[in-house]
Image (tube, rainbow, N blue to C red):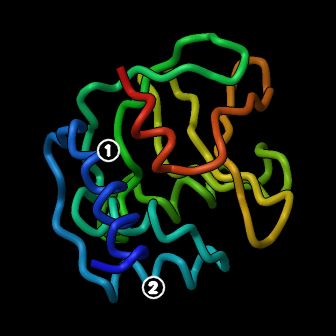
Amino acid sequence: MGRREQCEMKKMVDTMSVKWKYPIHVTKNQIDEALKQLGVTLPDDYIEVVALNNSASPEPHCFKLENGEEKVMSYLLSFDLSEKRNIVSVWNEMRNVLPVNVFPIADDPFGNFIAYQFDKVENPHLVYWNHELRKLSTITDTFTDLLKSLT
């Protein structure tokens, strides 16, 4: 097994402790269409999880912001554009409220979002959008790291 395959296997093992509840089937074409409408390229580790667990809720679901504050991930936003609350409809609803270059990918039970922030085109990082304070807080650099941190 080559180094790349070993790294991929390690990523899979590290994130296998997350169980996904209530996924909705989504095709590669649906994912591609949603990304086209959003006009972004989202990181591969996130897209790989969505392809298998579209619109699902993770268990465990708690994570910490960079400042140590604990938050909850409710569910991944759906890439099935026929779903009422999908990743494109949420973006269209929130685009004038969110800071520039912030794309929601998941929700919490309180109307806040986990999102990618594209400060650098090549390496977006994950942030938490608090809708009441209209404030971003850093979570982590990668979706894989977020999954590893769930408790």
SS at mark 2 in the image: helix
Q: Quadrant of the N terminus?
A: bottom left
Q: Quadrant of residue 122?
A: bottom right
The foreground one among 39 and 91 is 39
Relative to 110, is 123 on the left or the right? right
Q: Quadrant of residue 19?
A: top left
Q: Residues within 10 Å of mark 2 (few under 14, many from 20)?
A: some
Which sits earlier in the primary sequence, circle 1 or circle 2? 1
Q: Position of residue 137 (x, y in %)?
A: 75, 28
Q: Residues within 10 Å of mark 1 (few under 14, many from 20)?
A: some
Residue at image x 62%, y 10%? Answer: 69
Q: What label sits on residue 88 in the rendered view?
A: none
Q: Looking at the picture, does residue 129 appear above or below residue 141? A: above
Residue at image x 28%, y 56%? Answer: 12
Q: What label sits on residue 33 in the rendered view?
A: 2
Q: Position of residue 70 (x, y in %)?
A: 54, 12
Residue at image x 40%, y 20%? Answer: 62
Give the Cα distance between marks 1 and 2. 30 Å
| Residue, disc 1 | 14
Q: Amino acid at mark 1?
A: Asp
Q: Position of residue 96 (x, y in %)?
A: 79, 51
Residue at image x 56%, y 85%? Answer: 36
Q: Position of residue 20 (x, y in %)?
A: 19, 43
